[in-house]
Image (cartoon, rainbow, N blue to C red):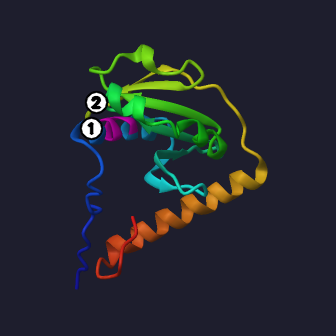
Amino acid sequence: MSNVYPLVPPVDGRQSDHALAIQRGVGRLLRMQGFAILTELPLATGRRADIVALGGSGEIWIVEIKSSIQDFRVDQKWPDYRFSCDRLFFATHSGVPLDIFSDDTGLILADGYGAELMREAPEHKLAGATRRAMFLRFAQTAALRLHGLMDPSLPQDW
């Protein structure tokens, strides 16, 4: 007997089509660089990071997606993400001027097919306890999401 599991997580519904395309392109870039990624990861601060990437040597990156100038201007929470990662990036698409993004963050230009690292992010190493907490949060979220795909009748908290 063969078990068939749905392999697509439910659609979150908060992201625009542009944001979803950026997310996909950034995901492809990060996977090619050896990172495992989770989207919409709840942080200890109560905020949600658009993309959290975990590298093979333990580095943690956060990528904040901005799909328009307005999206960037109304969001003042991004500096707080520095407390949860070693490097902080913005990701956007070609319709957004790149000069609006802070020079003290990395910058990724993406579409639905891929992405290009335009500017490396400065490194600001996490404290050991914070790194451990982020690892646990990442692992638990990934495991719960995988289990949710295997047993979709359970209540989901994506």
**Which labelled disc corresponds to residue 21?**
1
Specify the quadrant that holds the C terminus. bottom left
Residue indicated by mark 2: 111
- Image coordinates of residue 36 in percent, x first then y, are 49, 48
At 28% from the left edge and 30% from the top edge, which residue is drawn? 111
Task: Characterize the local packing of mark 2: few (<14), some (14-19) or many (20 or more) Cα atoms within 10 angstroms.
Answer: many
At 56% from the left edge and 55% from the top edge, which residue is drawn? 43
Task: Give 31 or 99, whichever is nearer the viewer.
Answer: 99
Task: Give 105 or 70, whichever is nearer the viewer.
Answer: 70
Q: With 17 as the anchor, is 27 left or right in this view?
A: right
Q: Which residue lies most toward the front here?
A: 74
At 70% from the left edge and 57% from the top edge, which residue is drawn? 132
Do residues under tags 1 and 2 come within 8 Å of each other at their CB atoms?
A: yes
First of labels 1, 2 by sequence position:
1
Kind of element beneath mark 1:
helix
Q: Which residue lies most toward the bottom here?
A: 1
Task: Give 128 or 157, whichever is nearer the viewer.
Answer: 157
Q: Is residue 122 above or below residue 38?
A: above
Residue type, mark 2 in image: Asp
Q: In this view, does 147 lie above or below 37?
A: below
User: Which quadrant of the figure has residue 115?
Assistant: top left
Residue type, mark 1 in image: Ala
Give the magenta part as a residue range: 22-26
Q: With 141 as the anchor, is 22 left or right in this view?
A: left
